């Protein structure tokens, strides 16, 4: 054996002894591309125990293991790291995913580099493939990628070495309207997310230092040339062993628009509330404390504002009937709104006024409140009472009225008689029913006596009994009672109800 061969074999054994215990995987190839040796770490990174399972050479290796790039594209056989090193190429930091052909459930991620070992004359002697198992790192990076993309908060990542954006998530693209290629590769000078920051100098200093940038308000320029109000913050991190800065954002533009709309709505409400000539009161729903009243309320009820605002409805005591007040707020609590409920109101000078109260539930500063509108109907009530009194007087002797006119007058009188007596038509005797029917026809007592062939006194007694049973006090009230129940109409007669 020549001295050169001996020296070569000795060097190789020494090299093998040195690299056997390394954590990096190492595969040695001869110049003829044959795989001649691999350390235990390299075998483990391929999920095998014997060197023969790697294949005899680079071609057999490619038939036993499938390689993909990190973008999931297959690696052509000619571009396999073992094929490249077999051709004598030198390279570094090639990332590939490796999967055994016969076990597709197992996958490793390798960072691979090559080394050409030369002899004393500088001629290639051995080809070396060195690999590092970065599966855990790649898995963590993949989880980060998925989390970053799925995060609803808009975010971008810039590399601190050149201040260029290297990642952007869909939230940022949606918020700004930029396309991905408009962001990736551009610098913070071209797309300056800190340009209009509230504390721009501090933010820029922290960016240069690679330190945390605290939350601050900013105005971010978007794709259409407009700007959006945002909250921006920066968090340093390492990505692919490079220092980076993660910028995250909160889009406060919808909130700002909502606040503007709310402020405008409140201004409109305040103007309408103050200028409305009808008394209006707002109180809390929980304890009925008056939060505000308009000028019309103060003028109409003659109260100074300090005696109303901040006090409860019960303390002010402007609703004359305490029972009516209790019923009013109980109904509000149950239904949330009321429409034209008649309530008697007492002014500060103790003068009484009739009001139709309408109320609704409103939300003010996230608290449920009641808005009460008081319509003064005192004059209308007085007019109705005068009309009813006049009708009562006229209908004491209704013999000279037509039946149609009597019905119309009775209906007018009904305006002031909302409650129905509980008595039934069947509570009357047959004779009392006859008398009531003739009363509804507009006949006087003498005419009823003649029609029924009864003595006038007997008719008067029957009329008094009918009034008593029906809880009415006049002919007009008796007519209203019958009309409300549809008695003595043509349809009623057709059914034979007597």
Image (cartoon, helix red, strand yellow):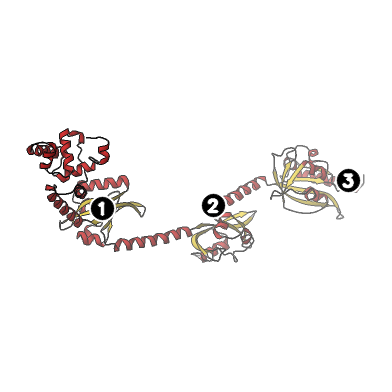
Q: Which residue is mark 2?
A: 152
**Vertical side of 262 occupied by 400: above or below:** above
Mark 1 secondary-structure assignment: strand
Circle 1 or circle 3, nearest the eye? 1
Earlier-in-chain disc, 1 versus 3: 3
What residue occupies the far left of the structure in this picture?
457
**Vertical side of 11 occupied by 279: above or below:** below
Q: Quadrant of residue 23?
A: top right
Earlier-in-chain disc, 2 versus 3: 3
> Which mark, by number, is residue 357?
1
> Which mark, by number, is residue 6?
3
Q: Distance of mark 1 from mark 2, alpha carbons? A: 49 Å
Q: Distance of mark 2 from mark 3, alpha carbons? A: 66 Å
Q: Quadrant of residue 445?
A: top left
Circle 2 or circle 3, nearest the eye? 2
Residue 388, x across and y down, in percent: 16, 51
């Amino acid at each position: 054996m020549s001295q050169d061969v001996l020296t070569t074999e000795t060097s190789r054994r020494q090299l093998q002894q040195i690299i056997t215990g390394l954590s990096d995987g190492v595969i040695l190839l001869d110049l003829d591309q044959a795989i001649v040796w691999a350390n235990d770490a390299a075998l483990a990174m391929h999920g095998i125990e014997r060197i023969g399972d790697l294949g005899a050479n680079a071609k057999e290796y490619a038939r036993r293991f499938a390689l993909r790039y990190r973008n999931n594209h297959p690696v052509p056989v000619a571009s396999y790291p073992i094929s490249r090193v077999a051709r004598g190429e030198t390279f570094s930091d090639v990332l590939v995913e490796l999967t055994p052909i016969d076990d597709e459930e197992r996958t490793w991620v390798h960072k691979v580099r090559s080394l050409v070992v030369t002899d004393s004359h500088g001629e290639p002697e051995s080809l070396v493939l060195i690999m590092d198992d970065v599966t855990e790192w790649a898995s963590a990076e993949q989880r980060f990628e998925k989390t970053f993309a799925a995060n609803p908060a808009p975010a971008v990542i810039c590399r601190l070495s050149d201040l260029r954006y290297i990642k952007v998530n869909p939230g940022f693209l949606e918020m700004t309207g930029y396309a991905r290629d408009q962001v990736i590769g551009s610098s913070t000078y071209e797309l300056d997310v800190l340009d209009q920051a509230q504390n721009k100098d501090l933010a820029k200093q922290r960016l240069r230092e690679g330190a945390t940038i605290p939350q601050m308000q900013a105005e971010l320029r978007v794709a259409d040339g407009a700007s959006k109000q945002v909250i921006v913050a920066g968090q340093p991190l390492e990505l692919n062993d490079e220092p980076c800065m993660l910028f995250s954002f909160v889009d406060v533009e919808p909130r700002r628009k909502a606040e503007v709309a709310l402020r405008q709505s409140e201004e409109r409400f305040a103007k309408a509330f103050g200028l409305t000539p009808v008394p209006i009161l707002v109180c809390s729903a929980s304890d009925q404390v008056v939060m505000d009243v308009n000028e019309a309320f103060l003028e109409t009820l003659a109260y100074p504002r300090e005696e109303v605002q901040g006090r409860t409805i019960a303390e002010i005591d402007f609703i004359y009937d305490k029972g009516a007040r209790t019923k009013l707020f109980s109904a509000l609590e149950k239904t949330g709104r009321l429409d034209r409920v008649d309530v008697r109101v007492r002014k500060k000078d103790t003068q009484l006024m009739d009001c139709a109260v309408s109320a609704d539930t409103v939300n003010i500063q996230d608290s449920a409140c009641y808005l009460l509108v008081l319509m003064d109907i005192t004059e209308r009530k007085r007019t109705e009472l005068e009309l009813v009194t006049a009708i009562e007087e006229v209908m004491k002797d209704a013999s000279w009225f037509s039946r149609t006119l009597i019905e119309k007058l009775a209906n007018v009188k009904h305006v002031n008689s909302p409650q129905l007596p509980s008595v039934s038509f069947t509570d009357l005797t047959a004779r009392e029913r006859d008398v009531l029917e003739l009363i509804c026809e507009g006949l006087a007592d003498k005419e009823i006596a003649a029609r029924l062939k009864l003595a006038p006194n007997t008719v008067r007694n029957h009329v008094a009994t009918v009034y008593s049973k029906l809880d009415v006090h006049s002919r007009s009230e008796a007519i209203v009672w019958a009309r409300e129940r549809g008695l003595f109409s043509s349809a009623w007669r057709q059914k034979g109800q007597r």
